[in-house]
Image (spheres, grey):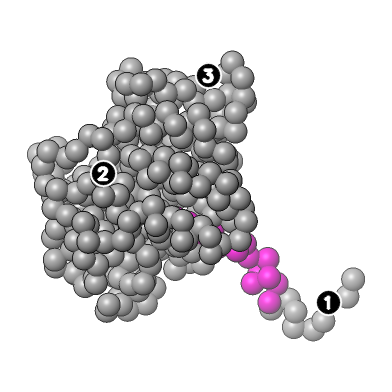
Amino acid sequence: MRLLPGLFLFLPLLLQAAPVKVIFDTDMANDCDDVGALAVLNVLADKGEAEILAVVTNRKCPGNSSAGASDAINTWFGRPDIPIGTDKDGAKVPWKQPSSYASFLHEEFPNDTPKDDKARDALDIYLETLKAQPDGSVTICSVGALSNLEDLLRADEKLVKAKVKELYIMGGGFPRTYHPETNIRLDPAAAVTITNEWPTPIVWQGFEVGNAMYNGQELIDTADNSPVRRAYELRPFRGGKAIDHGKPNHDLATVLLAVRGIQPEYWTVFKKGRVVIDSDGHTEWRRDYPKDHRYVKIKDHPRVLAGIIGELLATPPAKTPAQP
C-alpha cells in the first residue's frame, strides 16, 4: 500500500487510542488520596488519555462539601462543567469527624457547586451520563463505598450492561482479608450485591496495593494556590501532614489502572476465579468457578509505579485554571 505524502506526519494522531470515558465514584472527604486520584484523572485527561464524564460522591460528608471539593479540583484543572452528584443517604457507616480538607477546598477555591444536600443526586447523574454514551464505552472507577453502584444496578441493570465496559474497584484485600477493608466495610450489603450481580467485568485492586506505595511529598514543589496541595497540607498523617512524607496512594493507583488498563510490565493479574464478600465485609478470592472478575498485584518494586503516579500527581494543569 502506498501512503500519500505527508500522511506520516499524522500517523501518531491516527494511531492514538481514544480517551477512556470515566465516571469517577469517590468518598471525597475522608482521605486526601481521593483528591490525588481526581487530580491524576484530570492530568490524564490533559494528556488525552481520559475523558471525565462525571464525578459522584458516595459517602455523606459531615461538612456537606464533598461535591464542592470535587468541583474545586476540576475547576483548577480547567473543567468547571463536569457534572457532580452526591449520595444523599451516604454509606451505611457515617463519618464521626468532619473532613480535614473538604470544607476548606469548597470555601477557599473557585467552584460553583452547592452544599452536598443541595447538589444533584448521584443516581440521576449516573443515569443521565450513561444514557448519553455509546454502548460498551464507559469505565467506572470506584474508590469508596459501593452504595451508588448498588442504587444504579437496582434502578436500571439493562442500562449498566449496555453502557459500561468495565468497573474498577479499590476495595477489599487479596487473596483474602482478615479484617474488613474500609471501602467494603462502609456498606457491606452493597458490596455483596455488586460482587454477585454486577453484569460487566470487574477489576479489583486490594488495599495491599496502595499500601505499598506512598505519594504526596511530590506536591511540596507545586503551586501554593493548588487545591490538591492544600488537601495534602491539611490531612493529618502519622504525626504530621500527608504532604510531609506522602501517604498510601490507594485511589491514585486505581485511577491509573482504570485509564491505562492492566499494563503487563507493571501488574500481575489474577483471573479464572471470583471475589466473594461476606456480610461483615471480608473479601476472598476463590477459584471454585470463574466469573468476570480479576484482581491485580504489583509486578516489580512498588517504587516504579509510585514514581509514575507521583509524576502525574505533581503535574500542573495544562491550561490556566478555570473560573466558574
Q: Residues within 10 Å of mark 2 (few under 14, many from 20)?
A: many
Q: Position of residue 56 (x, y in %)?
A: 35, 54
Q: Amino acid at mark 1?
A: Leu
Q: Is residue 162 left or right of residue 4?
A: left
Say the numbered circle drawn on residue 3. Answer: 1
Which one is earlier in the sequence, the residue at label 3 or at label 2?
2
Q: Residues within 10 Å of mark 1 (few under 14, many from 20)?
A: few
Q: Residues within 10 Å of mark 3 (few under 14, many from 20)?
A: some
Residue shown at 38% from the left, 34% from the top: 190
Q: Which residues are magenta?
A: 10-23
The CA distance from mark 1 to mark 3 is 52 Å
Q: Position of residue 28 (x, y in %)?
A: 26, 50
Which one is earlier in the sequence, the residue at label 1 or at label 3?
1
Which one is earlier in the sequence, the residue at label 1 or at label 2?
1
Q: Amino acid at mark 3?
A: Arg
Question: Which residue is tagged 3?
Answer: 286
Residue shown at 13% from the left, 66% from the top: 107
* Cβ–Cβ under 8 Å for marks 3 and 2: no
Q: Secondary structure at mark 1?
A: loop
Q: On the rendered image, what quadrant is the C terminus found in?
A: bottom left
Q: Is residue 30 left or right of residue 310?
A: left
Q: Position of residue 97 (x, y in %)?
A: 10, 42
The CA distance from mark 1 to mark 2 is 57 Å
Of circles 1 and 2, the one toward us is 2
